[in-house]
Amino acid sequence: MKIKKALIPLALTALLAFGAAPVLAGDIISPATTGTADLRAQVDATYTVVIPASMTEDKSLKGGTNTIGALSATSLNLEPGTSLTCTLSGDTLTRENGVETLAYNAHFGTDQAAKTTTLAESASVDVNVEVDSARLAQAKAGTYRGTLNFTLSVQ
């Protein structure tokens, strides 16, 4: 019984000593009076681009040059030294319910090789689609559909 009586005060003393340590640790005063924090703000590039609308049933490509609309950009907020470009891709129309195809060449402006253009604030550039008149005349009857893709990138 004497051993139990001696252990209880010893255990309570140890508990008190360990419990007081965090309180004492909070009282330590650092000699530093100033500090710094590194801050960062990221502003992403933003822009609004208008591409030509899809062709509806009342519109159809003809042989020769077809201006299908204009590409334009507004509200450009780009990092200095960068520019917004657009690249066209797509070159084939496929007959619905068939396998026949009709080739076309899409380009910007009057240069038939211009697949990429740099967009400027509030400026527009025509999007043209060239269809070979002879091939169009020889194509099987039907509706031919395809997709013209506009890929934008900030460089």
Image (cartoon, rainbow, N blue to C red):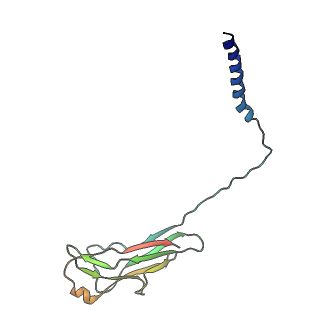
For the view shown, which residue lies furthest in the bottom direction? 134
Direction top: furthest residue: 1
Give residue 96's position: percent from left, percent from top: 22, 73
Residue 124: give x, y in percent of width and height.
Answer: 46, 78
Residue shown at 49%/75% (left/top)?
Answer: 85
Q: Would residue 2 be visible to someone looking at this image?
A: yes
Question: Left or right: 10 with respect to 97?
Answer: right
Q: For residue 128, which quarter of the picture? A: bottom left
Residue 51 appears in the figure: no
Near-viewer residue (121 or 20): 20
Q: Quadrant of residue 6?
A: top right
Residue pushed farthest right? Answer: 31
Q: Quadrant of the image for the N terminus? A: top right
The vertical placement of 64 against 3, above or below, is below
- Percent x, y of residue 104: 32, 82
Q: Which of 36/136 is in front?
A: 36
Vertical placement of residue 129 versus 8, above or below: below
Query: Residue 109: horizontal and vertical position, in percent?
Result: 42, 84
Residue at 68% x, 20% y is: 11
**Left or right: where does residue 86 sit relative to residue 33?**
left
Residue lying at 56% horizontally and 70% vertically, measured from the top left: 78
Name the residue: 76% across, 35% down. Answer: 27
Q: How many marks?
A: 0
